Image (cartoon, rainbow, N blue to C red):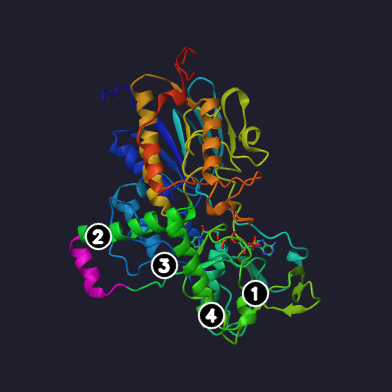
Amino acid sequence: MNTKRNPSVLIIGAGATGMLSAIRLRDAGITDITIIEKADRVGGTWRDNTYPGVACDIPSHHYCYSFEPAPWSHQCAVGSELQNYMEHVGKKYGVTETVRFNEVVTSCVYDDQGKWTVTTDKGAVFVVDFVIAATGILHHPKYPDIPGLDDFAGDSWHTAKWNHDVNLTDKRIGVIGTGSTSHQVVPELVNAGHDVTVFQRTPQWVFPFPNLKFPEWMRNRWKAKPSRTKPWKWFFKTFIEQFFVKATVGAPVQNAILKFSVKSYLRLGVRDKELRAKLTPDYGVGCKRLVVNFTFYPAIQKPNVDLITDGIEGIEPEGVRTKDGKLHILDVLVLSTGFHNFNYMRPMNVVGRAGHTIEDSWGEGRFRTSHAILMENFPNYFLMLGPGTPIGNNSVIGMAEEQIDYVLQLIDIWREERADEIEPTPQAVAAFADYIKAGLEGSVWVGGCQSWYQDVDGIPAIFPYPWSDFVKSMEAVDTSELTMRKLQNEEIARAV
Ligand code: NAP
């Protein structure tokens, strides 16, 4: 490539995706990079979530950067090991020292002249050519809209903001929610001998996946020669892509095996018929994000735990009152109620071309992008892991690696002076929405459930095709999907 210009790029967030973006941009010869992180450390999800039992439910040899294999202790690393890994990568690749920590980006405003003005809560102002919003998906805790929540007299917190200062010994603990997080935290609380009451609104399908510990001799071999982890990465990657992902997009054999696995696990794993009935979902397998776990069913059958399915009427100072009139007395209330998953880069104020706000584009709860990255009216602004990314039971790090290579191709168009402004055409955005919609037929996401993936039209903000299709879609930028303008507003290419 005959590179002429060196752009200024501002990356929002120093989680797994933000760090990756910085590393890849620098590898591509881009030197003017600013990284802004609201917290005091890198790590994103793994920094924020410290609840007991926090772990990745995707095998770590797959859930890690392709360029930095690690001698993982378990098949699925625990949260602290992942956080250490993130900090190690940040240091080793020289990212951490360049991050502006404890600073929140409050607004990004486009000036219609090829520049974004980015402002932070510390009053700093940056004028840059590109913004990469690596703000993550699940990081704004969602508090349940239950009457009386604030009246609870005991200690209460969200799983994403675990309060480690409260001694839980002899405490009666209530947990609201039974998603992936709850399936990890409840067994820890139960196995520690606490008296636990779990409030379930909707049961979940659970795929049994024991978290095996790798022997020390094996880890030592990986430490001595990291490339020895390659077959493991290949194995887990292939397993997820060929089994999990294909099962969700409707491949009949994989789908049948998946259904058989979760249903048999429930049948064999929970012997009591009444409890099993309570834990049996009435929607299709995989419609809600599949829980991958091997500890919840054993824990929920122990004598020191109750599964309550009567529905919550309200919260009172002493505990949770259910719709059958019963008051469940509690000392601690844990809210495992998920995240505002459609916030993406919000509450940041993002104003694009001609004063277009992100609320104008997405306000009604419809999330339109091109290739999950580009948004109409927001030139030179790239949203990592945006709506239409193949999230689900696969590695977001792998997804981000594909996406950043695509973003670099877009930036190269600018570097080669083929355009100053790059954004998707309206046709490309509409076509991408149609493409996502078309892929839903036969997929698990039309299985009659309400899940955090779905927008107001019930369209999941995911990629309902095999992984290979996603990789292919990221391989080469199709300039006919882009509106590319020169600064003088001379359009040099536009789709017909
Ligand atoms: P979630 O899947 O959104 O689950 C939230 C739970 O809270 C659901 O059971 C929900 O019930 C319940 N809930 C919400 N509001 C409620 C209310 N007002 N009253 C009663 N119940 C209420 O959240 P999550 O468990 O934190 O998981 C979110 C995502 O984080 C996962 O899907 C996964 O992608 C990610 N995660 C990943 C890992 C990993 O290892 N990779 C681990 C944990 C989490 P309904 O189902 O009825 O809405």
Q: CA distance from mark 2 to mark 4?
A: 33 Å
Camera-side residue of 350 and 199: 199
Q: Residues within 10 Å of mark 4 (few under 14, many from 20)?
A: some
Nearer the camera: disc 2 or disc 3:
2
Magenta residues (range): 214-225
Q: Residues within 10 Å of mark 3 (few under 14, many from 20)?
A: many
Q: Residues within 10 Å of mark 2 (few under 14, many from 20)?
A: few
The reply to whether the C-beta atoms of the residues labelled 4 and 1 are less than 8 Å apart is no
Left or right: 473 in relation to 372 = left
- Residue type highlighted by circle 1: Lys
N-term mark: 2 or 1: 2
N-term mark: 2 or 3: 3
The reply to whether the C-beta atoms of the residues labelled 2 and 4 are less than 8 Å apart is no
- Residue type highlighted by circle 3: Val
Q: Mostly what secondary structure, the magenta segment? A: helix
Q: Is residue 489 magenta?
A: no
Residue under pointer 1: 278
> Which picture quadrant has residue 147?
bottom right
Residue under pointer 4: 299
Left or right: 143 in relation to 374 = right
